[in-house]
Image: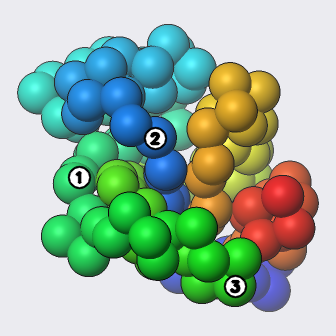
Amino acid sequence: MENLENLYCKLFIDTDIDRESLVQLISKISSGVITKYMISTRASEIEVRKNSGFDSENRLDKIDGFLYFRYYCDIEPKNENDKMDYVTSIGVLLRGLWDLNIRAVAACDFEELLPNSGGYKY
């Protein structure tokens, strides 16, 4: 696939729950195993981080407010040979968060392959 050369994905998440609870939630959605703030899934490694750029007012902006969400996840594939499984797993995570009314936006080179273009059309 043409847009699956760089598989890194940064997933911005806007919620007021604490970081530990978010890690638990992501682990449940993705069927992952937790080590501190890292979730290991069949397809990926997901690290949950606090966003140093968090801004409670700017996060509400419709265009680029996601840059100011409270958290972000660094997501990397476990096995680069199964690229579509990895992309699908990020889509599952996005939908799982959205189903819980948690705003989430993925920033990656393959956004068009994700549900709602990674959240930009959410």
Q: Residues within 10 Å of mark 1 (few under 14, many from 20)?
A: some
Question: What is the CA distance from the residue labelled 1 to the residue labelled 3?
Answer: 22 Å
Q: Disc 1 or 3, which lies upstream in sequence?
A: 1
| Residue at position x 62%, y 62% in the image | 105
Q: Which residue is mark 2?
A: 15
Q: Disc 2 or 3, which lies upstream in sequence?
A: 2
Which amino acid type corresponds to the residue marked 3 in the rendered image?
Answer: Ile
Q: Which residue is mark 3?
A: 63
Q: Position of residue 63 (x, y in %)?
A: 69, 84
Which amino acid type corresponds to the residue marked 1 in the rendered image?
Answer: Arg
Q: Position of residue 114 (x, y in %)?
A: 80, 59
Of residue 20 and residue 45, the one placed in the foreground of this image is 20
| Residue at position x 74%, y 63% in the image | 118
Q: Disc 2 or 1, which lies upstream in sequence?
A: 2
Outermost residue toward the front?
Answer: 57
Horizontal placement of 80 versus 116: left or right? left
SS state under label 2: loop
Q: Nearer the viewer, mark 1 or mark 3?
A: 3
Question: What is the CA distance from the residue labelled 2 to the residue labelled 3?
Answer: 18 Å
Of residue 65 and residue 31, the one placed in the foreground of this image is 65
Q: Nearer the viewer, mark 2 or mark 1?
A: 2
Q: Which residue is mark 1?
A: 49
Is label 1 in contact with label 3 (beta carbons under 8 Å)? no
